[in-house]
Amino acid sequence: MYDTLQTYMEEPPHMNIAYCIICHRNTPILRTSIHLLSPENTVYLHVDLKSNLDEFEEYRNQVVFVKQ
């Protein structure tokens, strides 16, 4: 049992964390956040309906767009 516990303490299992970001503009802080979070996690991006979705095209392969 100790060997199993020791192995668990040294190599914790990887958890995929989901982040939901709500925005209405494409800002530098949004770009940085997505860049830092997306490689190892799932990022859901909800863009306000009044916003221009073309501004967020650069994130097409990095996030999951939420429609509602």
Image (cartoon, rainbow, N blue to C red):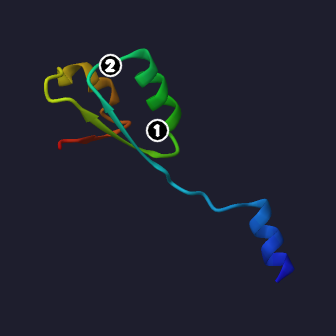
User: Tag 2: residue type?
Assistant: Asn
Residue at left offset 48%, top offset 46%:
41
Residue 7 locus on image (x, y percent): 79, 69
Residue 46, compared with residue 29, is above or below; it is below
- Per the model, the C-alpha gap separating discs 2 and 1 is 16 Å
Dividing the image into 4 quarters, which one contains the N terminus? Answer: bottom right
**Which of the two discs, 2 and 1, labels the residue nearer the N terminus?**
2
Q: What residue occupies the far top of the structure in this picture?
A: 28
Q: What is the quadrant of residue 46 in the picture? A: top left
Front: mark 2 or 1: 2
Residue at left offset 84%, top offset 77%:
3
Q: What is the quadrant of residue 59 in the picture? A: top left
Dividing the image into 4 quarters, which one contains the C terminus? Answer: top left
Q: What is the quadrant of residue 64 in the picture? A: top left
User: Which class describes the residues within 10 Å of circle 2: few (<14), some (14-19), or many (20+)?
Assistant: some
Residue 56 locus on image (x, y percent): 27, 24
User: Which class describes the residues within 10 Å of circle 1: few (<14), some (14-19), or many (20+)?
Assistant: some
Residue 25 locus on image (x, y percent): 29, 19
Residue 57, compared with residue 18, is above or below; it is above
Label 1 element class: loop
Marking on residue 26: 2
57 left or right, relative to 18: left
43 left or right, relative to 57: right
Q: What residue occupies the far left of the structure in this picture?
A: 50
Residue 8 locus on image (x, y percent): 75, 68
Residue at left offset 50%, top offset 37%:
37
User: Tag 1: residue type?
Assistant: Ser
42 left or right, relative to 11: left
Residue 1, compared with residue 41, is above or below; it is below
Residue at left offset 19%, top offset 25%:
53
Which residue does the numbered mark 1 point to in the structure image? 38
Label 2 element class: loop
